[in-house]
Amino acid sequence: MRSPSYYTHYLVLAAHRLLNAMMEDQMREASEERARLEEVDHDTSTHFAEYLYGGDYNPAEALIILGQEEQEDEEEASCKGDRRAGKEVYLLPFK
């Protein structure tokens, strides 16, 4: 199964010291133009993107809310024991 990709603006990544180092230094992420975050589920990726863009994350004031359909899918996956563990998330910068 192919891992989901989440596209992030290059300047947003550059504003964060560690992500900027990954994308600018002579690291694999710089040559591949992608940063891989392993074992991160969809919700965590969404919250992480919100932190990257907003500089803070407060679940009570979340900007990105899961839609009803996504919540139902998540509940169904939980019932089946599928926690989406082991998935890789790619943050691919826009340039």
Image (cartoon, rainbow, N blue to C red):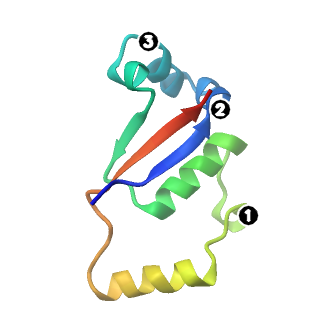
- 80 w.r.t. 3: above or below: below
The circle on residue 25 is 3
- Residue at mark 2 to residue at mark 1: CA–CA distance: 20 Å
The tag earlier along the polypeptide, 3 or 1, is 3
The tag earlier along the polypeptide, 2 or 1, is 2
Write the residue at 48% across / 58% down: 44
Q: Relative to the observer, which residue lies in front, 38 or 5? A: 5
Please state the horizontal and vertical placement of residue 23, each as a whole percent of the image.
48, 21
- Quadrant of res 33: top left
* Callout 3 amino acid: Asp
Residue indicated by mark 1: 61
- Residue at mark 2 to residue at mark 3: CA–CA distance: 16 Å
Secondary structure beneath dot 3 equals: loop
Secondary structure beneath dot 1 equals: helix
Secondary structure beneath dot 2 equals: helix
Write the residue at 68% across / 42% down: 53
Write the residue at 49% across / 25% down: 18
